[in-house]
Amino acid sequence: MSRAQPPGPAGSPIIVTLPDGRQLSFSGPVTVADAARAIGPGLARNAVAGKLDGRLVDTCEPITRDAELRILTPNDDEGLEVIRHSCAHLVGHAVKQLYPTARMVIGPVIADGFYYDIAWERPFTPADLAAIEARMQMLIAKEYAVVKRVLPRAKAIRVFSQRGEDYKLRLIEDMPEVQQMALYFHEEYVDMCRGPHVPNTRFLKAFKLTKLAGAYWRGDAGNEQLQRIYGTAWADKKQLDAYLLRLEEAEKRDHRKLGRELDLFHLQDDAPGAVFWHPRGWAVFQELIGYMRRRQRDAGYVEVNSPDVMDRSLWEISGHWQNYRDHMFTTATEDGRALALKPMNCPGSVLLYRHGLKSYRDLPLRMGEFGKVHRYEPSGSLHGLLRVRHFTQDDAHIYCTPQQMDGECREVVALVLDIYRQFGFEDIRIKLSTRPANRMGDDATWDLLEGALLRALQGMALPYQLNPGEGAFYGPKLEFVLRDAIGRDWQCGTLQVDMNLPERFGIEYVAEDGQRRRPVMLHRALFGSLERFTGILLEHHAGRLPAWLAPVQVAVLSITEAHAPYAQDVALALRHAGLRAEADVRNEKIGYKIREQTLQRTPFLLVAGDLETDNGSVAVRLRDGQDVGTLKLADAIAFLLERTLAPDQSVRRTQQAEHLLRMAVPAAPTT
């Protein structure tokens, strides 16, 4: 659990090279903290850890030979992770002081924070959480030193045996090859960890405990239940306050809350992990499908559909039965056949490709499918539209020659980035996930596939994050991560390159030389899951969906009952024009109706009173309160149609207008 540097030659100076190329010379071994002091007192005060020859280490780590060193402070991402990890240990310190019989389990860092799993005889309450936080603040105020000691395995076992920490002993049992263990002492409290940790609790002041939850030992529902304390920690109070404000805003934007308020969908135990779409929510869902259908058609895709239930033998060929069985819903027929609800669309797509001989002239063949898939997710992980068991993917599989592979990868990347921008996502991160330990195919094939994705990114000059070992079992992948309006990241689309499934299913095409060859298969989903993307959109826009996507685009409001027939006629005319319109003719005051429709996030409100009824007009308002004015009904319809175009239709209309203009204007004479 702890590795020290091997010493350099006796008597020779130790050269420490800094990130800017400067070098420090020491006559003998020093610690990372010593090196920080040699650089400057300000850096020494802010040093939370170091990066020694690329390895994260504590500030007490000895430097015994020439090395490259970077000092980490709270303003570094890795320094912030060290702070969060140390806060998790501080939870343990506080809990043991307040509840001495509690037993500590694990306390890792997670996105934006940390948690600690704890075993205790009764559930923690919000009052306990407040007491633990107060005790942590008291301990931080003492600004005590966090001390690291590396102990032999046997001694570490004695330490935790004497303290009755049986979960720590079980963790040690899981590491039979480790003979030395790093223990961190917070005064009388001790914990085991590979580290690094902050040298002093003064770095931990900007923290907050956020919630309580249940957890299972080793994540297995068959094991004993533990209690999980979540928290967040930041470099300073300003960052902490900004994060807490984001949390507050996220709660307001929760898509489950918006789903109830806007009457979009619901979930219930009769179909766990599946969505009951209400008419308004289904309208949004179908608009998303219509948008993607148009984009795919314009990009040269054909649309197909494959069965939901297929024989076990198919999943064995694909490798899903061996690698994904725990996530599949299966059943058996009277004649003993094992069937599975499809967790992915790929095998069905392969069978569609295999139906009939293909030539190189047919490639690339881009086959899109809005396929329903079913995956078993533990009940505790289900979360509204964001984590479900039954969902629809905007899946597509592209079959191409090896020579076409690079170009097809670039086309997919360009398409997905353009689509996300049309939905209002400008900050898009790309992750390249490479071969996992458990995979199909040889290294030469993986080299070729990973190279195609890498060349696409480099050829388009796109930055990316490398995720070694995180690819699918059949091929590497790109993951597209969207940052929303309040700074949260959402992983959505994927692009995977695969030569293993074509090999396993034996699919071919006739090459130009008449030989049978294997195509390359690209797996591509841009929304990912339509259910999840809907939830992300609701939270990103706080329910104020763009007018083209809104479940109800226009509400026609009657001022009195006398205006109700005209309001209903107007709504009917709007629907005939292709708009999603409703008439609100309730016997309520007009101010109440406007407020109600504004809360429903309806983009356009048309008011009908005496004047409008008499001259065939409507008063047009926007949901933000802007008054457009009174328009004749025909003009109002034209106004609304223009402002409810989907972004791809707006682009198409502009292109058509430019084309017509070019056709109408004579070309300049040539000389």
Image: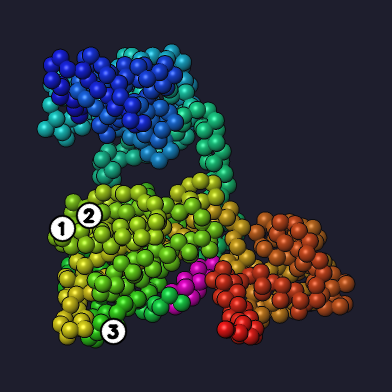
Residue wearing tag 2: 435
* SS category of the residue bearing label 1: helix
Residue wearing tag 3: 361
Which quadrant of the figure has residue 624? Answer: bottom right
- What segment is highlighted magenta in the picture? 284-297
Compared to residue 132, the image places residue 264 above or below, namely: below
Disc on the earlier residue, 3 or 2 = 3
Work out whether residue 256 can be spotted: no
Disc on the earlier residue, 1 or 3 = 3
Compared to residue 358, the image places residue 391 above or below, namely: above
Picture coordinates of residue 641, whole percent (x, y): 66, 74
Which quadrant of the figure has residue 216? Answer: top left
Give the amino acid type for the residue marked by disc 3 in the picture: Arg
Give the amino acid type for the residue marked by disc 2 in the picture: Arg
Picture coordinates of residue 137, whole percent (x, y): 47, 20
Q: CA distance from mark 3 to mark 2?
A: 31 Å
Picture coordinates of residue 167, whole percent (x, y): 24, 30
